[in-house]
């Protein structure tokens, strides 16, 4: 970039363009929400038939287009701001060098060279002629040494000063040129396919674009206020509120996963960030699955008719050795992401509120936090912690449980907003035999639950701050118990269902008001008895040789009726005492709770 171009460069013009793209992205976000939460809902509720179903599918595609537009506009806005930032830094260096040169009696020429006036060094009798020097960017130890030697030898004292100004100008011009060269391909890459279909390839490209903008915009990103290190939800909230619209947009564009994981931030912000991560993760998984050859038929009949009746195909064995494990991992993640999307798509069905994705990660067994309704505006919020074998692949069943609880609670709430949240925010034990007897899964996950519960209080905008209930199933109760034992649980009520033990020996240690610990044990549920024989959640009876569980009278919980539920998995079945009792606790309707006689 030459001197005239850099002098004429106006960062504000690029920043204004960035504002325009950010505004367009906001409009796309509003359009997406309108389609998902209003237009599609009204269409499903008012019309039936194949035409209506087809229209809903078209609206889903349009929503995806707006979501992609929102994401890409955020990247373009951030890239333009990053480019303007880098050039502005170079321009300030140029302007400072030119001003210093003028103040020292030197003249900066159009080509970047510097002319200096006549002058003489102290003690010299004759005045040395003036001249012009051209600077060089960068330099090396050798070139710098030669330059210093030339300055010392030269009779005109202005020569050395002019050379320093010329070098500063050359450095600024090179910095601007490097920025232009760096950003040009990144900006050109922010271009979508010329069609109306947002494919997995498009989302994969968006992920690549994000990495490109993040890499090119490192200096700009480093200039943004960073979130507090190991900050509390209150710290996180204060940081986010203190950011400008531009800074918030940049963090969402460059660090969506990090923003989406910050407790204390508004649910709408976390949802926006995590939906982008979800779309990009699903694209990655789908594309990788597409590269794996189709699974061959595993068995075929033994045509000779001898025993065994079927034989395992060699081709399947070879496929399984090469692809089987990875194919299973990808399929499990994909199934979970499809379940989350299905919940998004069911908004409005029988009055179901919008869903909010408050956490998402595909690493390991995967994690997801899905809310029915906005917890920031809810008067009553329930946080459900699932137990052993829970993972991203099976998140659909846990989300469905909280959907049922939302419907029952909403019917009892007297018109007040309710939010029910599936919190798979920890690495749950995956085996009843090999993993569940150990407490470290609960102990490791408990601080994250405490942080999340604190964040709900911080983000809630109701006058009372909201009424919050922690609900645990199976090993999830163990984690809630560990959360209470390790720190402040920040809940008003606790509900246990099918609990094998909660690491404390009595309800008074659960960090909620007296009388606000509730327990359900369905008929024929085998899990609670596991706590009596070494389960990781048990606290032992002194001298008794068996564990204390919430179902014990000694524990001191309110024992709720579970009529209509059997076994370990029916606590959220419609028209059961189990579900109605939980809803009564969630909405603070304690007089409606049916206690076990």
Image: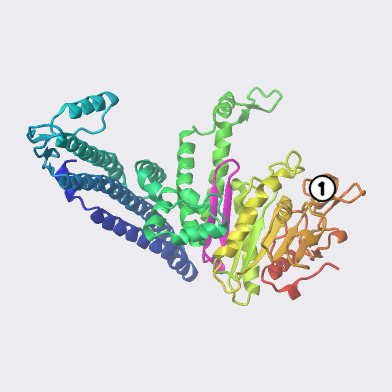
Magenta-span inclusion, residue 246: no
Judged from the image, the secondary structure of the residue bearing numbered disc 1 is helix
Q: Quadrant of residue 64?
A: bottom left
Instruction: Residue at 71% x, 55% y: name it.
Output: 480
| Label 1: few (<14), some (14–19) or many (≥20) C-alpha neighbours in 10 Å | many
Q: Quadrant of residue 416?
A: bottom right
| Of residues 104 and 404, the one drawn nearer to the viewer in this rendering | 104
Q: Which residue is mark 1?
A: 530
Residue 336 appears left or right of 575: left
Q: Identify the image quadrant of residue 580.
A: bottom right
Quadrant position of the C terminus in the picture: bottom right
- The magenta-colored residue range is 347-374
Q: Nearer the viewer, residue 572 or 181?
A: 181
Residue 591 appears in the picture as rendered? yes
Q: Residue at x 70, y 61 (%)?
A: 573
Q: Position of residue 53 (x, y in %)?
A: 45, 61
| Left or right of residue 16, residue 460 in this image | right
Q: Position of residue 86 (x, y in %)?
A: 29, 46
Q: Quadrant of the N terminus?
A: top left
Work out whether residue 68 or residue 143 is closer to the camera in this orientation and state it: 143
Instruction: Tell me which colouring the rendered structure shows.
Output: rainbow
Vertical placement of 37 versus 231: above or below?
A: below
Q: Residue at x 52, y 64 (%)?
A: 354
Please tell me which residue is depicted at 62% across the width and 46% down the height of the picture: 391
Asked if residue 297 shows in the view, the reply is: no
């Amino acid at each position: 970039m030459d001197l005239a171009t850099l002098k004429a460069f106006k960062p504000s013009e690029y920043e204004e363009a960035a504002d325009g793209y950010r505004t367009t992205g906001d409009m796309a976000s509003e359009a997406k929400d309108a389609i998902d939460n209003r237009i599609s809902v009204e269409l499903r509720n008012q019309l039936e038939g194949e035409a209506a179903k087809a229209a809903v599918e078209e609206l889903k595609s349009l929503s995806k287009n707006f979501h992609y537009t929102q994401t890409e506009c955020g990247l373009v806005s951030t890239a333009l701001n990053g480019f303007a930032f880098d050039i502005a830094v170079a321009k300030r260096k140029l302007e400072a060098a030119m001003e210093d040169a003028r103040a020292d009696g030197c003249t900066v020429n159009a080509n970047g060279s510097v002319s200096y006036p006549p002058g003489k060094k102290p003690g010299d009798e004759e005045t040395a002629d003036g001249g012009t020097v051209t600077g060089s960017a960068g330099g090396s130890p050798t070139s710098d040494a030669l330059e210093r030697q030339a300055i010392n030898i030269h009779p005109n004292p202005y020569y050395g000063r002019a050379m320093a100004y010329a070098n500063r100008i050359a450095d600024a011009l090179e910095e601007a040129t490097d920025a232009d060269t760096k950003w040009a391909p990144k900006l050109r890459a922010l271009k979508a396919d010329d069609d109306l279909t947002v494919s997995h390839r498009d989302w994969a490209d968006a992920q690549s674009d994000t990495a490109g903008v993040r890499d090119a915009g490192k200096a700009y990103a480093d200039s943004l206020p960073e979130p507090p290190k190991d900050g509390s939800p209150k710290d996180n909230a204060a940081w986010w509120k203190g950011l400008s619209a531009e800074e918030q947009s940049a963090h969402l564009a460059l660090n969506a996963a990090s923003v989406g994981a910050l407790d204390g931030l508004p649910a709408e912000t976390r949802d926006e960030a995590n939906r982008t991560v979800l779309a990009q993760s699903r694209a990655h998984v789908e594309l990788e699955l597409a590269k794996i050859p189709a699974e061959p038929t595993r068995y075929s009949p033994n045509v000779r008719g001898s025993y065994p009746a079927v034989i395992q195909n060699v081709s399947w064995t070879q496929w399984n050795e090469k692809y089987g494990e990875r194919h299973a991992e990808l399929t499990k993640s994909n199934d979970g992401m499809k379940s989350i999307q299905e919940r998004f798509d069911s908004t409005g069905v029988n009055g179901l509120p919008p869903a909010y994705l408050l956490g998402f990660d595909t690493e390991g067994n995967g994690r997801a936090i899905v809310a029915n309704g906005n917890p920031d505006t809810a008067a009553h919020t329930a946080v459900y912690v699932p137990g052993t074998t829970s993972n991203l692949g099976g998140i659909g069943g846990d989300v469905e449980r909280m959907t049922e609880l939302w419907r029952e609670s909403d019917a009892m709430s007297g018109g007040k907003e309710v939010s029910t949240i599936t919190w798979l925010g920890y690495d749950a034990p995956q085996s009843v035999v090999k993993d569940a007897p150990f407490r470290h899964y609960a102990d490791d996950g408990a601080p994250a639950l405490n942080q999340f519960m604190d964040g709900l209080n911080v983000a809630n905008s109701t006058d009372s701050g909201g009424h919050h209930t922690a609900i645990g199933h199976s090993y999830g109760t163990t984690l809630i118990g560990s959360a209470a034992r390790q720190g402040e649980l920040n809940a008003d009520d606790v509900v246990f269902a099918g609990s094998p033990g909660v690491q404390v020996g009595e309800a008074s240690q659960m960090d909620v008001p007296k009388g606000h610990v509730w327990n359900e044990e369905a008929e024929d549920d085998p899990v609670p008895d596991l706590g009596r024989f070494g389960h990781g959640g048990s606290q032992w009876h002194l001298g008794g040789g068996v564990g204390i569980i919430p179902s014990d009278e000694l524990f001191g919980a309110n024992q709720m009726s579970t009529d209509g539920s059997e076994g370990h998995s029916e606590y959220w079945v419609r028209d059961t005492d189990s579900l109605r009792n939980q809803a009564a606790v969630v909405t603070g309707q304690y007089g409606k709770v049916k206690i076990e006689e």
